[in-house]
Amino acid sequence: MSYGLDKELTDAISAVIINSFIFPNFREGKYQKRIVEAVNTITDVITGNSSDVMSRIKAEAKIVEMQSKRAEKEKMIANTIFLLIFFYRLVC
C-alpha cells in the first residue's frame, strides 16, 4: 500500500474489507463479484464517500484494531512473566 493512503486505508480497514467482501464469496466461487465490491469499497474509503457500509467497516475496523492491541499487550505480559521466571530460576 502507498504511504499516502495510510490514514484512509489502515490495516484494520483493509482486514475488514478482505474478511467482509473478498473471503465470503471466494468460498462460493464468486470471485469477480467480490473483487469488484472490494475495489468499490476501497474507492469509497479513499474518496471519503459516506455510506452505511463505510460506517460499518470503520466500526469493525476499530474492533479489529482494539483486538490487535489487546493481543499485543497480552503477548508482552506473557513474555515479561516468562523472563521473570527464567531470571529467577537462573539466580536461585
Image (cartoon, rainbow, N blue to C red):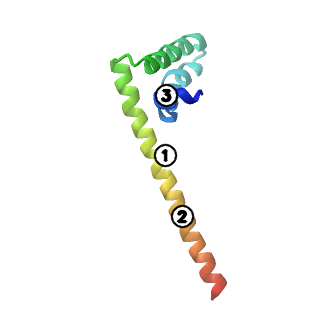
Quadrant of the image containing the C terminus: bottom right
| Residue at 38%, 22% in the rendered image | 54
Residue located farthest toward the right when viewing the structure as drawn: 90
Q: Position of residue 91 (x, y in %)?
A: 64, 86
Along the line of sight, the residue nearer the viewer: 69 or 19? 69
- Per the image, the residue denoted by label 1 is 68
Cβ–Cβ under 8 Å for marks 1 and 3: no
- Secondary structure of the residue carrying tag 3 is loop
- N-terminal of the pair, mark 1 or mark 3, is 3
Placement of 87 over or under 44, stated as above or below: below
What residue is disc 3 on?
9
**Which residue appears at 45% of the width and 39% of the height?**
64
Q: Which quarter of the picture shows residue 57?
A: top left
- Mark 2: which amino acid? Ala
Q: Nearer the viewer, mark 2 or mark 3?
A: 3
The quarter of the picture where the N terminus appears is top right
Query: Which residue appears at 52% of the width and 34% of the height?
Result: 11
Task: Please tell me whether mark 1 or mark 3 is closer to you in this view.
Answer: 3
Question: Which quadrant would residue 45 be assigned to in this image?
Answer: top left
Of the numbered discs 2 and 3, the one sitting upstream in the chain is: 3
Secondary structure at numbered mark 1: helix
> Which residue corresponds to mark 2?
78
Along the polypeptide, which appears first: circle 2 or circle 1? 1
Residue type for callout 3: Leu
Q: Helix, strand, or loop for circle 2?
A: helix
Amino acid type, residue under disc 1 in the picture: Ser
